[in-house]
Amino acid sequence: MAVKKKTTKKSTKKVSKVKAVRKKIPKKTIRKTSVKTKSLKREKPKKIRATKRKIILVLTRLIFFAGLSLVSFVLYLLMTNAMLKNLFNLLAWIFGFVSLGLLIVLLIFLILKALRK
């Protein structure tokens, strides 16, 4: 026996697009007013002060990241697994560059403090 497939009719309703009606304003009713602009004030640059608290904060972070770099380098030398060796090598480089940046910031703070006196 042949089985008949049921065919469903899809409704093909046309969707009418509604166009927005723009109201036309006569040119006579439009006023032209001058726009007043406020003059922009330039802010004075904020002075960077090398306080004792900032120097201690940078110094402690420098010691922390230098220690992490050293530990990562030692673990790099001790590992035999290639993946862990590459990981600790990468970490040693990253922590080394962060500590180098902190060393530069510390030197800048010390120079600023020396110039202030």
Image (cartoon, helix red, strand yellow):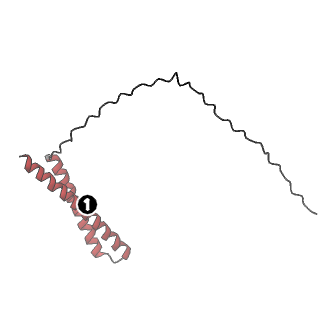
Q: Quadrant of residue 43?
A: top left
Number of numbered callouts drawn: 1
Question: Residue at the front extreme?
Answer: 28
Residue 33 % position (x, y): 42, 25
On-image quarter of the N terminus: bottom right
Q: Amino acid at mark 1?
A: Val
Q: Which residue is mark 1?
A: 98
Q: Residue at x 38, y 28 (%)?
A: 35
Q: Residues within 10 Å of mark 1 (few under 14, many from 20)?
A: some
35 left or right of 72?
right
In the depicted structure, whether residue 16 falls above or below residue 10: above
Tell me: 51 left or right of 79: left
Residue 79 position, x and y percent, is 32, 75
Residue 31 rendering spot, x and y as whole percentages: 47, 23
Return the residue found at the far left: 117
Q: Residue at x 34, y 30 (%)?
A: 37
Q: The residue tagged with tag 1: helix, strand or loop?
A: helix
| Residue visible at 73% across and 41% down in the picture | 15
Residue plotted at (14% across, 46% down): 51
* Residue 9: percent from left, percent from top: 83, 49
Q: Quadrant of residue 17?
A: top right
Left or right of 86 in this view: 20: right
Front in this rendered view, residue 103 or 74: 103
Q: Quick one: 23 or 15, which is closer to the camera?
A: 23
